[in-house]
Image (spheres, rainbow, N blue to C red):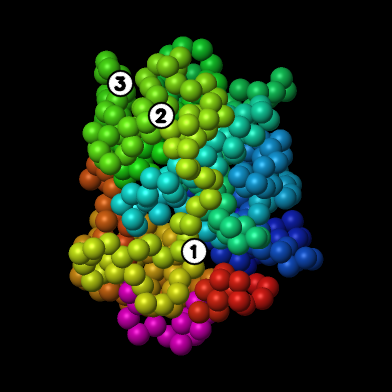
Amino acid sequence: MTAVLLDVGDVLDGRYQLLRDLGRGAAGAVFEARHLFTGRMVAVKMVMPHSRGANIPELRARLQREGRALAAIRHPGVVDILDGGVTLDGSPYIVMEMLEGRTLEGLIMARTRLPVLASVAVALQLCDALDAVHRAGVLHRDVKPANIVVVKGIDGREVVRLVDFGVAKLDLPSEEKLTGQGAILGTPAYMAPEHLLQEGDKPDATVDVYALGVTLFECLTGAMPHPGTFAQVLLSVAREGPPASVRTVFPEVPPALADVVDRSIAKARADRYQTAQELAAALEKALPDASRQTTLLGPPPTPKGAAAGEQRRRTPRAPYNTPVRLTLRDGKGIDGRTEDISDSGALVLSFADCEPSQRVGLRFALPMEGKIIGVEADVRWVRASDKQGSQGMRAIGLEFVQPPLEMKTSIARYVQLMSGQGGAR
């Protein structure tokens, strides 16, 4: 049967109109879509049938497993699955709620590190979510800031949501083993040592506890216990001795909290907290004043002595995640994604290098209509992480240069809507 290649503008399964890309990988894509009957905005994830070098049957099986994993979990801290199906060529898709928020990765990149209480609040919410995940017989296996989204709940409060169960493991008798011998699934810097080194028994809840510990370490410090490339992480993890304490990177972390973080990323599985709720109890004991409420989506305070490009934006902004294409002054094109947007600028994340104080071309989809538009922008600041050495993520602060009225109007409407002042989208 001929493979069906769907793209923006097409209608999936007679019900979902694909409006814009949310992201594409080597073998899969996520689209923002509109349910044609209800008008609800959703996120549709599917396998791309013409992916070069990809094991399409395995990828399809993984997507079906992701759908089953999400269906087994019902928790406000986990993205909700709404629907699923199979296209005419036999390719599965899943439909999830559309989350308009900021990734924890983007927040850390933009602010270097998060305040102590905010970091602990994020971790406590994630402990609650992981407890529900594990009680459902699921291991996430890829907990990291890029897979954590902070959104506004219906009551206006911020909620931390765990997404992307693409490499999740289900502890169910009917589940077929998909991971081949020697295969490593996940992100090395967040993988428990026994998982990365393929030692010991089958993984358990402690692999997610470890990844959450690394995430908390990163929130508090902006750094990683084991930074670098895959080979560098593997070498660092394989060495004898524990990783560096969080206080060696950021001494202002309270000692009791540092002890909790250090134990959560202990090299030996038996030395870690065995469940997410054990970790939550330890965090609450270390910081009795800690709460689960965050205020990360509001504008951060302007740091003393900050450069002009790092000052608080003059116009309101809203979370917005969409792929972008930057064209540098030497003609080189780089790919990235937005984290937030205003009618005067945007925050872009990219793995490619970009120098500040230059003018670039920017192409992206408008938030309200999905129309692709081009505009010039000035690079006000660039901040790099240490996750992958010189190839690490960059946060790029852009200011639009003479944006078209259509673009300003569309973005202003979107920002107003996201602030709760604009009615239905």
Looking at the rendered image, the disc whose residue lies closer to the viewer, 3 or 2, is 2
Across and down, in percent, residue 51 comes to 51, 45
Which residue, given by chain and number where applicable, does mark 3 sit on? 242
Q: Quadrant of the C terminus?
A: bottom right
Give the residue at x 52% y 58%.
101
Secondary structure at badge 3 equals loop
Q: CA distance from mark 1 to mark 2?
A: 31 Å
Image quarter hosting the N terminus: top right
Give the class, few, some or many, for how many residues have Cα within 10 Å of label 3's Cα (few <14, many ≥20). some
As drawn, which residue projects farthest toward the bottom?
A: 405
For label 2, the crowd category at 10 Å Cα-Cα, with few meaning under 14, some 14 to 19 and many 20 or more, is many
Q: Is residue 210 left or right of residue 414?
A: left
> Which tag is nearer the camera, tag 1 or tag 2?
2
What is the secondary structure assignment of the residue under circle 1?
A: strand
For badge 3, the amino acid type reads Pro
| Residue under the image location 27 percent in, 15 percent down | 240
Residue at 68 percent of width and 73 percent of height: 424
- Residue shown at 67%/42% (left/top)? 75
Q: Which residues are magenta?
A: 398-411
Question: Is mark 1 in CB contact (under 8 Å) with mark 3?
Answer: no
- Does residue 161 appear anywhere in the picture? yes
Q: Amino acid at mark 1?
A: Pro
- In which image quadrant can residue 199 be found? top left
Indicate whether residue 422 is drawn in magenta.
no
Residue 225 falls in image quadrant: top left
* Circle 1 Cα neighbour tier, 10 Å, few/some/many (<14 / 14–19 / ≥20): many
Tell me the tag on residue 319.
1
Q: Amino acid at mark 2?
A: Val
Residue 200 left/right relative to 98: left
Q: How far, Cα to Cα, is label 3 from label 2?
A: 14 Å
Disc 2 target residue: 260
